[in-house]
């Protein structure tokens, strides 16, 4: 109960031989992967005849690092650092003839008096200089908790007007994977007023001008990178990175993000490396904060995390604002809450599943074209669950090994997994991963959804472990499924992507494990054989009807041809359809102005079924290339992209043995949602077609696809349409005519 605050079951290791100061003994150790440091129990103390005594008045000792450090490196609050090797930054306008400017905000007398000493200090150091500029941005004064003031400049119009730079910043998760496995001592150094150490080119200084609140009718501008400028963080990061390339230490590893982290194996090595590094910063002209420096410690706070030997945990400064966050009432507030919880998502098992109601709430609010949130009991519960989940977040292991395992499962359309590294017979969690599957994958059978989950989570895991060896474990035979016939469910491009990632790419191995525990995402028992045959399961449970054949209907009562078309004349779109036999016209009518050719085709099909209800009918449909226009899929029409495949996939799996009747169960992988249902009329007509087909066959429509292997027929795909025993369909695309299928009873 003491470690995590809740009851939990742990296991003992095998009996191990130990040597403690020449005392030989055997001991079974308790395995607690999330423990931030090894636990020393009374049982092992008794075996070595040792006792622990605590001093009632412990003495405080500071590392002796500062004695050999150049005092110029420490910020004194009066002067800022100036990087000696920094290159002046040039900022360019998108339009050199347009100068962004905005009138200053009215400031109270109290604010002006609070900002006056700050501005005077910056002017004395040469960071602010007088100017006459066509640009101007307003400033604000923010009062701190200690009574002092902070100068804030609103640079939003400047950020929009200048040419943006691509931010080259390290990934914090990838960064922590570079901590050595044997590192036990750490130092964290925070640079003071870091942006002010990088100069701004003289020709770019006019952009950041503002009105001097201490002297009316005058302007000031910056000679260094200002705070609030969008590109300041990564411009400073690049400048510091160039300087750090000249620092070499054989005893420590230096990691740079916002702050600087030094990692070493021993306290002495960490002390020497910290001294050398601080002196190096002083020589380069940087200033460090003495108050925020953490020197030669076994546990440090870095990027809001608590870093110790082999582990990382969420710091209280990350948890507190989440626990104290009020219920959001606007979209912006909810996005902010999800942003701060998303940073901690690798500590929360199943974060994607827990946060799904909140993301759904955002989508519904946007659809309603409002900014105010309407909370339901479900969304309020999800908000509370996310808050309390951080209280149970374990300390995760740092990715310090060379072999890693990714256990993957899927639940309710969310890919769930845990990245681990082996520690003896047990798995030590590194990160809990979760992502929502796309709408296409959500309509697949469970076996295929797990493959989609593995393809989603594997790249995330590879980022964290920095491309080292990864083994993906699931309760399904992923390799067999990907090498079998799954093209009726996946497009060729998706299948190729999955195969290149999981079979031929950076993933080292694919293994089968037992069913995963829903709480830990780890296997409940060792089992390297799946509990079912995935290929057989897909064949038996998700196949078309056994009596569905690929030959024409013999001796039909009649053969009916349908067509629909649309064209523009005098700026007006006109449309019509026809239902005919070889001898007569059964029906030919015009349609309302604005009707598309696609809708005309559906109307023709509907009327053919209505006019010949109960007949054994062979139905020939002309599928022109208009069916594949951007009006349907919102896609550019490119024969190389096989648009027909995407169109067919949008109608896939209307009738499967394990599926209920749901129109559009598998939307196209090329679009989001159902593009046909952008208007009630189109959706209504399409549902009406499905209903007629359902009534005739006492089943549900089915549309599958099989790509032609003939290289001359780039646009030809055979479409399987389960329409029942009364109708046979022929699809005519250009000069190619295909008899699709018929049902023989």
Image: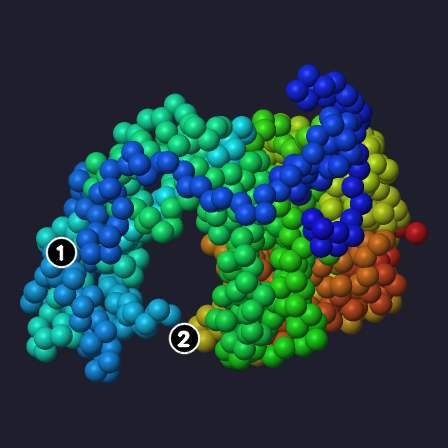
Q: Which residue is mark 2?
A: 570
Q: Nearer the viewer, residue 437 or 155?
A: 155
Looking at the image, residue 248 lies above or below residue 172: above
| Cα distance between the residues tagged 2 and 1 | 72 Å
Looking at the image, residue 536 lies above or below residue 604: above
Q: Which mark is residue 125?
A: 1
Please name the residue shown 10% across and 66% down the image: 133
Q: Which mark is residue 245?
A: none
For numbered disc 2, what is the local secondary structure?
Answer: loop
Circle 2 crowding by C-alpha within 10 Å: few under 14, some 14–19, many from 20: few
Count of marks placed on residues: 2
Tell me which label, 2 or 1, sits earlier in the chain. 1
Please name the residue shown 42% across and 27% down the image: 269
For numbered disc 1, what is the local secondary structure?
Answer: loop
Q: Nearer the viewer, residue 12 or 540?
A: 12
**Residue 377 in the figure: left or right of residue 508:** right
Looking at the image, residue 169 lies above or below residue 653: above
Quadrant in the picture for residue 417: top right
Residue 624 location in percent, x, y?
58, 56
Residue 728 location in percent, x, y?
79, 55
């Amino acid at each position: 109960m003491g470690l995590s605050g809740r009851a939990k079951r742990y296991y003992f290791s095998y009996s191990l031989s130990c040597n403690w100061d020449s005392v030989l003994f055997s001991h079974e150790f308790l395995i607690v992967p999330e423990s931030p440091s090894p636990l020393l129990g009374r049982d092992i103390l008794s075996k070595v005849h040792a006792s622990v005594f605590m001093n009632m008045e412990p003495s405080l000792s500071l590392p002796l690092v500062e004695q050999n450090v150049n005092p110029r490196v420490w910020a004194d609050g009066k002067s800022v650092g100036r990087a000696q090797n920094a290159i002046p930054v040039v900022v360019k306008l998108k339009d050199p003839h347009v100068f962004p400017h905005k009138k200053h905000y009215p400031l109270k007398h109290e604010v002006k008096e609070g900002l006056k000493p700050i501005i005077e200090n910056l002017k004395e150091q040469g960071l602010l200089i007088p100017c006459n500029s066509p640009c101007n941005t307003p400033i604000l004064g923010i009062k701190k908790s200690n009574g002092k003031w902070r100068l804030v400049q609103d640079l939003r119009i400047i950020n929009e007007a200048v040419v943006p730079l691509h931010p080259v910043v390290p990934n914090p998760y990838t960064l922590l994977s570079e901590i050595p496995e044997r590192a036990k001592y750490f130092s964290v150094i925070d640079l003071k007023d870091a942006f002010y150490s990088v100069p701004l080119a003289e020709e770019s200084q006019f952009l950041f001008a503002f009105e001097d609140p201490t002297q009316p009718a005058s302007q000031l501008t910056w000679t260094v990178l200002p705070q609030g400028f969008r590109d300041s963080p990564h411009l400073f990061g690049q400048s510091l990175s160039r300087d750090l390339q000249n620092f070499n230490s054989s005893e420590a590893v230096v990691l740079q993000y916002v702050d600087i982290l030094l990692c070493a194996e021993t306290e002495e090595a960490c002390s020497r490396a910290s001294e050398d590094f601080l002196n190096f910063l002083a020589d380069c002209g940087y200033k460090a904060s003495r108050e925020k420096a953490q020197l030669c410690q076994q546990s440090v706070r870095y990027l809001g995390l608590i870093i110790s030997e082999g582990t990382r945990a969420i710091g209280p400064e990350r948890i507190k604002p989440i626990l104290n966050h009020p219920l959001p009432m606007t979209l912006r507030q909810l996005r902010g809450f999800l942003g701060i919880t998303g940073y901690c998502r690798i500590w929360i098992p199943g974060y994607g599943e827990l946060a799904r109601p909140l993301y759904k709430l955002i989508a519904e609010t946007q659809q309603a074209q409002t900014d105010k949130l309407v909370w339901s009991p479900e969304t309020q519960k999800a908000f509370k669950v996310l808050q309390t989940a951080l209280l149970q977040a374990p300390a995760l292991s740092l990715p310090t090994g060379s072999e890693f395992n990714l256990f993957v499962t899927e639940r309710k359309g969310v890919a769930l997994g845990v990245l681990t590294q082996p520690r003896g017979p047990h798995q030590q969690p590194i990160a809990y991963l979760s992502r929502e599957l796309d709408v296409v994958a959500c309509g697949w059978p469970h076996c295929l959804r797990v493959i989609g989950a593995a393809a989603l989570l594997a790249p995330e895991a590879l980022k964290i472990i920095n491309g080292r060896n990864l083994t993906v474990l699931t309760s399904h035979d992923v390799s067999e499924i990907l090498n079998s016939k799954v093209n009726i469910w996946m497009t060729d491009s998706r299948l190729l992507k999955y195969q290149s990632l999981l079979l031929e790419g950076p993933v080292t191995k694919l293994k089968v494990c037992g069913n995963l525990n829903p709480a830990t995402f780890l296997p409940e028992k060792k089992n390297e054989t799946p509990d079912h045959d995935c290929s057989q399961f897909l064949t038996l449970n998700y196949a078309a009807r056994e009596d569905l054949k690929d030959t024409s209907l013999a001796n039909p009562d009649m053969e009916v041809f349908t067509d629909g078309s649309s064209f523009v004349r005098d700026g007006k779109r006109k449309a019509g359809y026809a239902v005919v036999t070889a001898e007569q016209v059964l029906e030919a009518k015009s349609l309302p102005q604005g009707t598309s050719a696609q809708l005309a085709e559906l109307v023709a099909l509907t009327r053919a079924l209505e006019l010949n209800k109960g007949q054994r009918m062979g139905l020939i449909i002309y599928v022109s290339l208009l069916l594949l226009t951007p009006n349907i899929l919102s896609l550019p029409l490119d024969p190389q992209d096989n648009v027909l495949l995407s169109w067919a996939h949008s109608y896939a799996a209307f009738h499967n043995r394990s599926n209920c009747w749901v129109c559009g169960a598998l939307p196209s992988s090329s679009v989001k949602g159902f593009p046909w249902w952008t208007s009630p009329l189109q959706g209504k007509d399409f549902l009406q077609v499905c209903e007629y087909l359902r009534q005739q066959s006492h089943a549900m429509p089915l549309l599958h696809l099989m790509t032609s292997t003939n290289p001359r027929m780039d646009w030809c795909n055979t479409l399987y349409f389960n329409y029942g025993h009364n109708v046979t369909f022929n699809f005519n695309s250009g000069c190619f005519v295909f008899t699709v299928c018929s049902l023989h009873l």
